[in-house]
């Protein structure tokens, strides 16, 4: 895999609970925190050549991935995707119970990676091959950014998990409801990390989509 210099814009995400919220939660003093497991996913890359250049231009407007000049005849599409699953246990005290997360499993990455190439281009022509390579580079950048940031995402989320206490519930209460509340807190906590990842991804993609690179790649076909 080709190495690229990635621009890190991740800052430590501090998750704070108010003193009032902690004081009202009698389970906050427990020091048990979950094991965090993070796994990356990319999906299966598909190639689609059923669209003409005009249709691809309309599609790129909707996906905000519009390109210029001859590169409008291609499009690399992908969706950032994540899920969070949690396992927990309960601990009973005299007049209340604590729902304590044991593990948090996060699946993070992409789904539905697609490369579109306009059917207006002649297969194996210079322009076809340059546009195809350009879109493949976009998908390669997606992979490299994900590989680079997965360890960082795990580290940041582990810090977050240390700051989220177990959830108190009434004696013989609904543990599923309490677990849902904790799951929501964790899900909200990961969103800023996802947003930062998406911003970084956009920055890295612009290293490919700029006037200088467009000119260089376009010139590859000038002599053909």
Image: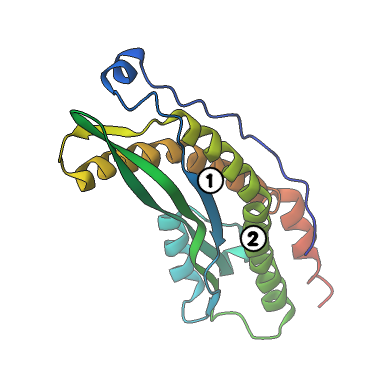
Distance from disc 2 to disc 1, alpha carbons, whole Å, reads 13 Å
Give the image location of residue 197, x and y in percent: 56, 44
Is residue 4 placed above or below 69 in the rendered structure?
Answer: above
- Residue 143: give its label: 2
Q: Residue 158's quadrant in the figure?
A: top right
Classed neighbour count for the residue bearing mark 2: other residues with Cα under 10 Å, few (<14), some (14–19), many (≥20): some
Q: Is residue 222 left or right of residue 98?
A: right
Q: In which quarter of the image is the N terminus?
A: bottom right
Q: Quadrant of the C terminus?
A: bottom right
Furthest residue toward front: 94
Q: Is residue 73 left or right of residue 126?
A: left
Residue beneath the point at 65% across and 86% down: 123
Mark closest to the chain's N terminus, 2 or 1:
2
Residue beneath the point at 53% across and 77% down: 46
Residue beneath the point at 57% across and 64% down: 72
Q: Residue 23's quadrant in the figure?
A: top left
Front residue of 97 and 57: 97
Is residue 54 placed above or below 199 in the rendered structure?
Answer: below
Residue 117 in sight from this viewpoint = no
Classed neighbour count for the residue bearing mark 1: other residues with Cα under 10 Å, few (<14), some (14–19), many (≥20): some
Give the image location of residue 66, x and y in percent: 52, 56
Which scheme is used to colour this image of the protein? Answer: rainbow
Per the image, the residue denoted by label 1 is 198
């Amino acid at each position: 895999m080709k190495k690229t210099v990635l621009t890190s814009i991740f800052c430590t995400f501090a998750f704070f609970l108010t003193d009032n919220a902690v004081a009202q939660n009698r389970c906050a003093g427990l020091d048990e925190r979950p094991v965090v497991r993070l796994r990356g996913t990319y999906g299966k890359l598909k190639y689609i050549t059923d669209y003409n250049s005009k249709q691809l231009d309309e599609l790129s407007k909707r996906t905000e991935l519009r390109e210029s000049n001859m590169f409008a005849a291609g499009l690399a599409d992908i969706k950032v995707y994540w899920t969070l699953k949690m396992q927990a246990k309960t601990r009973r005290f005299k007049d209340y119970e604590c729902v304590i997360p044991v593990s948090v499993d996060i699946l993070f990455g992409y789904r539905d990676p697609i490369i579109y190439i306009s059917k207006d281009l002649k297969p194996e022509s210079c322009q076809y091959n340059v546009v195809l390579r350009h879109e493949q580079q976009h998908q390669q950048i997606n992979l490299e950014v994900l590989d680079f940031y997965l360890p960082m995402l795990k580290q940041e989320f582990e810090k977050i998990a240390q700051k989220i206490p177990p959830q108190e519930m009434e004696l013989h209460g609904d543990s599923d409801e309490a677990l849902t509340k904790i799951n929501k807190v964790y899900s909200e906590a990961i969103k800023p990390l996802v947003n930062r990842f998406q911003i970084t991804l956009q920055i890295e993609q612009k290293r490919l989509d700029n006037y200088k690179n467009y000119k260089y790649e376009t010139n590859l076909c000038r002599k053909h």
